[in-house]
Amino acid sequence: MTDRSTRISEARSVASALLDDLETSSLSIDKILMRAKRLARLMRDTDAQLWLDYETKGYPSDFNFKSLESCEKYAISSGRYNLSEGTYRTHSLSEVEARVYGAQVTLDSFSPVAVGAVKDFLEKNATEKMLDQQIKIQTNNKNIYTNYKSLFVSYIAGIHNYATDMYLALELGDAAQDIFEGARHEIDSFVRAHCPKAAEKIVAINERIADDSIESRTAALTSCRRLLMTVADSLFPASTKDWLDSKGKPRKVGEEQYKNRLLAYMAERTDSSSNEAILNSELEFLAARLDAIYEKTCKGVHVDVSAQEARLAVIHTYLFLGEIAILPRDSLVVV
């Protein structure tokens, strides 16, 4: 198990425990905040770490909630920050919890005087006045308690929303990984059996993406193009004789026309015209992107490829192999 998978597994456990704490336990808010901070650290979520730090120690009087970025929504949903008015409460969660506890103690300690047991008129009159004052004080204490309790529950709900989002994100990651693993099994089996030379290209692409420089990302996409050419060589070797597509149009299928050769292979194994059109569209989009980068590099033009663009192009290339892998594979030519 890699360091990343170990970290993600631990984050999943922490998220689950945090939700249990928030929903069923009576842990102090300090301990809950520490667990939430640990989850944010494991998820490499710097926005959440900043937000939870302020929830722990309180907010300054001139705070800009935009600085929380992705976690601003939790401050808004919890009632901490009123977006329409631009106002917010500065006290920490621990302070609110302490005020709730203090108000609760005051309420529990209230013991009204039994007026009916007092016989003397003057004493009774004085006692009623005192009791009336006590009731007013107690009513105020109840309002204080209700106010802080409401705030506390609302702020806790913000942390609960964050923990829920992180837990669902981790669950979604597991589901996506399972789906991708199934596709990978199909693709790997296909490559090993029918175009083993493509395996070397896949390894090279992975190494270049991992290097994470502009030059390596450009090289990775150029390798994606070579990968498709290698697959085309195995599935539909180059020929000087044109191939007629479904509309009777002749297409060149020479060495450089790898796209036409892949189209020819897929067309011969696709019964549905709609499926063929979808596959053709996917290949056109992918090849156009890869060919454009290839042509620029051949001309010595600098190509600025972002990490996200390169990663998505590699994924599209790999998944396109998955589309080919599930087609009927009779009489393949392996070279």
Image (tube, rainbow, N blue to C red):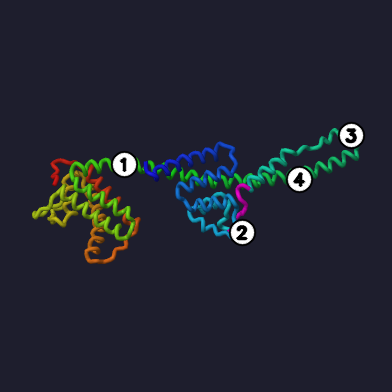
Distance between the alpha carbons at the discs numbered 2 and 4: 31 Å
Classify mark 1: helix, strand or loop: helix
Residue at which label 1 appears: 181
Q: Residue at x 26, y 55 (%)?
A: 285
Instruction: Give the mark toward the camera: 2 or 4.
Output: 2
Distance between the alpha carbons at the discs numbered 1 and 4: 65 Å
Q: Is residue 141 magenta?
A: no
Q: Determine whether 55 is above or below 304 in the image.
A: above
Left or right, 213 with reference to 296: right
Distance between the alpha carbons at the discs numbered 4 and 3: 25 Å
Residue at which label 2 appears: 61
The amino acid pointed to by label 4 is Ile
Q: Residues within 10 Å of mark 1 (few under 14, many from 20)?
A: few
Question: Which numbered tag is attached to residue 223?
Answer: none
Position of residue 78 measured from the top left corner of the image (x, y, whole percent): 56, 49
The amino acid pointed to by label 3 is Lys
The amino acid pointed to by label 1 is Glu
Residue at which label 4 appears: 137
Q: In this orientation, does residue 74 appear?
A: yes
In front here: 116 or 215? Answer: 215
The magenta segment: 86-94
Position of residue 16 measured from the top left corner of the image (x, y, whole percent): 48, 39
- In the figure, residue 208 lies in which quadrant? bottom left
* Mark 4 vs 3, N-terminal side: 3
Residue at the extreme left = 241
Q: In this orientation, does residue 311 appear?
A: no
Distance between the alpha carbons at the discs numbered 3 and 1: 85 Å
Distance between the alpha carbons at the discs numbered 3 and 2: 56 Å
Residue at which label 3 appears: 119
* Mark 2 vs 4, N-terminal side: 2
* Mark 2 vs 1, N-terminal side: 2
* Mark 3 vs 2, N-terminal side: 2
